[in-house]
């Protein structure tokens, strides 16, 4: 049997920077790495099934695009491989409505939200003024979020144009401005390492924290949130968003637990993560224990 430290299962060109850096860091650390892509998927599946291929860890970057990867990952898991992120844990935290309840029990501060279920009524509460945001309970793509809804007709149109699995109605948040930047943040948790960024909600551009005194205070709060979110979901690699609304001082969670996260870099696209962040993520993952 061939046994590796890591198996990386991936499909999309978006993950090429991650795969390349994982390769480089694995060589530097003398860590063995086997990659599964479309080109060798069937062969790898057969080898795992025949107990001819194994690994201590497997990083799943493929099942979101190609569900048959789940079969491969389940076989690895039965043979003792730890999966990052484990599909079982990922499935348990896929519903934003359930996540809000779990976050509340952990006393995590959340923006106001109103839940709509398949039973209706399909209308916003009086406390949420237009414009407001509609988010599908399960989906995470851009089409499953409507920003700038104004009335109940917009809610009904959203439901009609989406596979309806429940939704959240949230107020449109205008963030406080700190040092000429919106107080909106995206934090990445990677195997215990927590990397914080300023994140512009208009253009989605990341800017890594630079270690200022003000950032250190924000980072302490965000790190405590991140640890609680990990305790809830047991997800090894995720991101979440927070903001300080205009006229307020408390950091509120506005996007709950994103996984899988986009690991493309700013070298390739303006809304990618900084190259330094990718390096920290890879370093944290290969130091898993």
Image: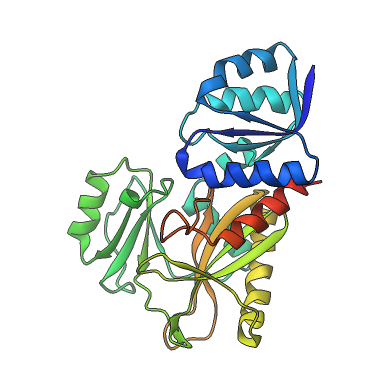
Outermost left residue: 153
24 is higher (above) or lower (below) than 106: above
Which residue is pictured at 25% across the width and 51% down the height?
158
Most foreground residue, 100 or 121: 100
Q: Quadrant of the N terminus?
A: top right
| Total tally of numbered discs in the picture | 0
The location of residue 177, given as percent across then percent down, is 43, 85
Most foreground residue, 170 or 184: 184
The location of residue 118, given as percent across then percent down, is 34, 45
Please name the colour scheme applied to the rendered image: rainbow
Which residue is pictured at 30% across the width and 68% down the height?
132
Q: Is residue 40 visible?
A: yes
The location of residue 140, given as percent across then percent down, is 42, 49
Q: Is residue 93 visible?
A: no
User: On the picture, is 179 further left or further right than 281?
Assistant: left
Which residue is pictured at 48% across the width and 53% down the height?
96
261 is higher (above) or lower (below) than 71: below
82 is higher (above) or lower (below) than 40: below
The location of residue 159, given as percent across then percent down, is 26, 48
Quadrant of residue 113 within the rendered picture: bottom left
Which residue is pictured at 31% across the width and 40% down the height?
163
User: On the picture, is 212 further left or further right than 2?
Assistant: left
Quadrant of residue 48 within the rendered picture: top right
């Amino acid at each position: 049997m061939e046994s590796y430290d890591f198996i990386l299962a991936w499909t999309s060109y978006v993950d090429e920077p991650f795969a390349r850096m994982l390769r480089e860091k694995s060589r530097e650390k003398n860590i063995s790495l086997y990659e599964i892509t479309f080109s060798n998927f069937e062969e790898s599946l057969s080898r795992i099934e025949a107990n001819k291929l194994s690994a201590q860890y497997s990083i799943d970057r493929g099942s979101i695009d190609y569900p048959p990867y789940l079969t491969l990952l389940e076989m690895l898991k039965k043979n003792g491989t730890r999966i990052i992120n484990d599909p079982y844990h990922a499935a348990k935290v896929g519903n934003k409505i359930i996540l809000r309840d779990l976050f509340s029990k952990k006393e995590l501060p959340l923006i106001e939200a109103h839940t709509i279920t398949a039973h209706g009524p399909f209308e916003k509460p009086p406390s949420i003024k237009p414009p407001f945001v509609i988010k599908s309970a399960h989906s995470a793509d851009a089409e499953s979020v409507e920003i700038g809804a104004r009335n109940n007709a917009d809610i009904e149109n959203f439901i009609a144009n989406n596979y309806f699995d429940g939704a959240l109605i949230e107020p449109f948040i205008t963030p406080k401005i700190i040092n000429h930047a919106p107080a909106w943040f995206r934090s990445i948790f990677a195997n215990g390492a927590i990397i914080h960024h300023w994140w512009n909600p208009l253009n989605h551009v990341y800017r890594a924290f630079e270690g200022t005194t003000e950032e250190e205070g924000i980072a302490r709060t965000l790190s405590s949130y991140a640890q609680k979110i990990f305790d809830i979901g047991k997800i090894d690699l995720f991101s979440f968003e927070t903001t300080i609304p205009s006229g307020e001082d408390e950091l509120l969670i506005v996007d709950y637990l994103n996984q899988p996260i986009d690991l493309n870099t700013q070298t390739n696209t303006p809304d990618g993560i900084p190259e330094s962040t990718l390096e920290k993520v890879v370093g944290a993952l290969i130091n898993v224990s």
